[in-house]
Amino acid sequence: MSDAPSQARPDPNGDRTLAVVNYVLLLFAVSNGVTALIALVIAFIRRETAPAWLRNHYDFQIRTVIYGIIIFVVGFATIWVLGLGLLIWLIGAVWLVVRTVVGLMRLVDGRTHPDPATYGI
């Protein structure tokens, strides 16, 4: 038995790397919504073949994009009501960044997300 720390096994399919790329695309979605749609498509395609702990992250990413689209639509619909839409967009942008960073940190640590169906973090 060796006292050396065990090394993480390499991911032959690149699923973990692709999940990290997806989180980065979600971070860019604050300024460019197209990257959120790209992340959504990638998550839908890869979630069926990914290991269970990564499938959890893909589900989390899918829900993040869907909730983000809802926030965008509500903000757009209320933009003419005393600037309420701008406040909704600002809160939504902060929510998206925090949710994405927390998910990315869990992925880098090799942990699954405890509840990908939640609206919160």
Image (tube, rainbow, N blue to C red):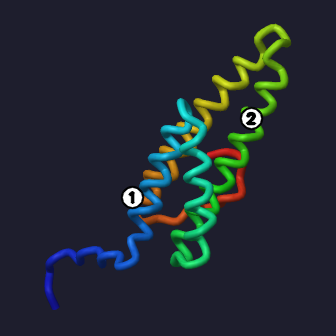
Residue at 71% x, 53% y is 118
Q: Which residue is mark 1?
A: 108
Q: Which residue is mark 2?
A: 71
Residue 46 position in % (x across, y down): 55, 70
In the rendered view of the protein, which quadrant contains the N terminus?
bottom left
Residue 102 position in % (x across, y down): 50, 47
How many discs mark residues in the rendered view? 2
**Seen in the image, is 3 located left or right of residue 11?**
left
Instruction: Reply above or below: 11 against 91.
Output: below
The residue positioned farthest toward the bottom in the image shown: 1
User: Which secondary structure lies at badge 2?
Assistant: helix
Instruction: Reply above or below: 41 against 9.
Output: above
Mark number displayed over residue 18: none
**Amino acid tagged 2:** Ile
Residue at 51% x, 78% y is 51
Mark 2 vs 1, N-terminal side:
2
